[in-house]
């Protein structure tokens, strides 16, 4: 079998023991969770167990096929979107999944990133397109150049959105041109070109703390996720909100959020982690680790 990576490479679970590494490699995140519970490192939690079981199914596909593209052949959803209240164990479930994938399938290109940081990278990539940095060779064959963006677009008031809001139309600049392209369909926008370039280097993409807070982000997430998923990337995400509850009260939410939700549900199983325990609050109150892990925290050898 392939050599396992160094323990320090296993996300934020810390350094796993050899036994834990072997279980993660051969049996997946569910078995790894059971081991850590039996050792007293973590506590038994039914909601966490259900979430990890779903991740274990995805791990099995990845471990079996090694290449994410082949997973689309069975017509099933490749990804998973976990949502639930703060401190319920979503990040822990992701830790276990990443550890198991990295040990069982070292050839897979796996990336884990905070969603806010990832969107910052996407925005930077979109800005770089002005210098011709995007590689259109990553686009699917047969796609046509995107429609003209900017004042030169013929017979189109590209700087205005449609007449869906209470004032008839609202100005949101560049976002409006992306909306125009998305409504027309069949032509790759700049966002889709950037997403195709990102997807070309990944098999599994894991997001921590998915949230949408600005109109700019809300506009781009639909074509971004649609392209990532259609390119064969398995997307796994955690969030404090269900997909339909994201970007609450945001500008033109009714226009931009539904396409994103549709793209997400088409490629990901959406699962609510219904734990009534807030392990973070417990840890803060007692001063103990309480089996809770936070973004950026470190854990000793298990």
Image (cartoon, grey):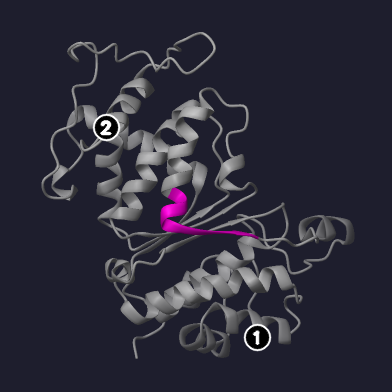
Locate residue 260: give its quadrant. Answer: top left
Answer with mark 2 or mark 1, whichever residue precedes in sequence. 1
- Secondary structure of the residue carrying tag 1 is helix
Write down the region rendered in magenta: 264-272
Marker disc for residue 295 = none
Magenta residue check for 143: no
Q: Is residue 149 above or below residue 200?
A: above
Locate residue 93: give its quadrant. Answer: bottom right
Looking at the figure, which quarter contains the C terminus?
A: bottom right
Looking at the figure, which quarter contains the N terminus?
A: bottom left
Q: Is residue 187 above or below residue 93?
A: above
Which residue is disc 2 drawn over? 128
* 4 on left or right of 37: left
What residue occupies the far left of the structure in this picture?
A: 142
Q: Position of residue 186 (x, y in %)?
A: 21, 38
Q: Is residue 36 above or below residue 230?
A: below
Q: Position of residue 76 (x, y in %)?
A: 39, 67
Which residue is disc 1 drawn over? 35
User: Is residue 202 visible to the viewer in this orientation of the structure?
Assistant: yes
Query: Whole-Å distance between the Cαs marked 2 and 1?
Result: 46 Å
User: Is residue 14 visible to the viewer in this orientation of the structure?
Assistant: no
Label 1, residues with CA under 10 Å away: few <14, some 14-19, many ≥20: some
Residue drawn at the location 52% of the way across and 29% of the way down: 254
* 285 on left or right of 181: right
Residue drawn at the location 24% of the way across and 16% of the way down: 150
Q: Position of residue 103 (x, y in %)?
A: 44, 79
- Secondary structure of the residue carrying tag 2 is helix
């Amino acid at each position: 079998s392939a050599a396992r990576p160094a323990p320090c490479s296993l996300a934020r679970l810390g350094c796993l023991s050899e036994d834990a590494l072997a279980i993660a490699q051969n049996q997946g995140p569910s078995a790894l969770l059971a081991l850590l519970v039996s050792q007293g490192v973590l506590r038994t939690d039914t909601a966490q167990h259900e979430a990890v079981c779903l991740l274990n199914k995805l791990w099995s596909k990845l471990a079996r096929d090694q290449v994410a593209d082949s997973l689309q052949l069975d017509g099933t959803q490749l990804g998973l979107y976990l949502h639930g209240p703060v401190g319920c164990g979503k990040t822990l479930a992701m830790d276990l999944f990443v550890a198991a994938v990295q040990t069982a399938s070292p050839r897979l290109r796996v990336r884990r990133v905070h969603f806010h940081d990832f969107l910052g990278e996407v925005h930077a990539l979109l800005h770089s397109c002005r210098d011709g940095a995007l590689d259109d060779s990553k686009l699917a064959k047969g796609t046509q150049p995107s429609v003209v963006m900017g004042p030169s677009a013929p017979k189109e008031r590209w700087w205005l959105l449609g007449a869906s809001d209470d004032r008839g139309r609202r100005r949101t600049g560049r976002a409006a041109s992306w909306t125009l392209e998305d409504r027309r369909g069949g032509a790759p926008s700049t966002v889709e070109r950037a997403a195709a370039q990102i997807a070309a280097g990944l098999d599994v993409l894991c997001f921590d703390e998915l949230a949408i807070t600005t109109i700019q982000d809300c506009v781009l997430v639909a074509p971004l996720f649609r392209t990532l998923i259609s390119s064969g990337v398995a997307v796994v995400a955690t969030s404090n909100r269900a997909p339909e509850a994201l970007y609450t009260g945001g500008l033109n939410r009714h226009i931009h959020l539904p396409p994103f939700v549709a793209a997400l549900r088409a490629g990901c199983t959406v699962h609510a982690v219904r734990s009534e325990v807030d392990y973070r609050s417990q840890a803060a109150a007692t001063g103990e680790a309480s089996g809770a892990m936070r973004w950026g925290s470190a854990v000793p050898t298990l």
